Amino acid sequence: MSANINTKELIVNEALEYLSKRDAPYSDTLPLLLKQPSYASICEIVEPRDLPKRGDFATKEALGALIHSIAHIEFSAIDLAIDAVYRFRDLPKEFRIDWLIVAQDEIRHFRMLQKLLAKLDLAYGDIVVHQGLFDISMKSSGSAIERMAVVPRYFEASGLDANPKIIKKLQSYKRDPLIAELIDALKIIYNEEIEHVSKGDKWFKYLCQKEGSDFQERFLDIIKKYNLKSRAEQFNIEGRKAAGFSCNELIALGAKKCN
């Protein structure tokens, strides 16, 4: 997979245009298991514990590290959406269209953050990153239902929890025009990520119904299989409800209350 954002955008746009007019041709070739993420050619990859610590957002270094980390999440999300289209070929055409639209959104999000990095004289790849999302995508490469559970319904939903908290911390610095721009970008990302999680929720429930399983029990089983914590104490209840989670499920996942 190319690390060039322009190439990614071209491929996604052409694929979406093709699918809007006809069905995808059948392929009996098995999807490849990727050995490394696309960004390995432009980023230094380290363990999560070795990432730079975030300090006072008033400093250029801390602000750059924050924007770069969010840009990396968005870049990873582009690849995850494209990989879902490439890998899970036995799902309906609507599945491919949904994730290509998600990829388009993630590309736009990345470009917004890329422009903010440029204003700090930084570029994507100037700060070390980790490959956690890539690793989890490859671990779930053999199962569409597990991919929909761990990526949109777990990790992207966790982004819905974190985004408003980051915005709240940034509010104290919004006199800085760059931070004001970042807050605006994060608000756009938040609203559109609700739709992305909702798409994952839709296809996870579709696959549960297809195999005859209870989606709440299935989700709990999958996150346990992947050794993922519920993080219920951090839940953004309203954001998760907007993305398709019910109060019953949020309580089952550990939320103290949900109205």
Image (spheres, grey):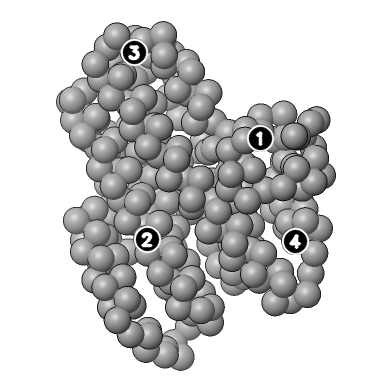
Mark 4, secondary structure of its residue: helix
- Packing grade of label 4 (10 A; few <14, some 14-19, many >=20) is some
Q: Nearer the viewer, residue 190 or 12?
A: 190
* Identity of the residue drawn at 71% across and 69% down: 208
Query: Would you say the residues marked 1 and 3 are in contact, meaning their CB atoms lie under 8 Å apart?
Result: no
* Identity of the residue drawn at 21% across and 23% down: 120
Amino acid of disc 3: Lys
Amino acid of disc 1: Ile
State whether residue 97 appears in this view.
Answer: yes
* Identity of the residue drawn at 24% across and 16% down: 177
Disc 1 from disc 4: Cα separation = 19 Å
Q: Nearer the viewer, residue 241 or 3?
A: 241
Q: Which numbered disc flags the more N-terminal residue, 1 or 3?
A: 3
Q: Mark 3 highlights which residue?
A: 174
Q: Mark 4 highlights which residue?
A: 215
Q: Which numbered disc flags the more N-terminal residue, 4 or 2?
A: 2
- Packing grade of label 2 (10 A; few <14, some 14-19, many >=20) is some
Mark nearer the viewer, 1 or 4: 1
The image shows residue 174 at horizontal and vertical percentages of: 34, 13
Q: Mark 2 highlights which residue?
A: 101
Amino acid of disc 4: Phe
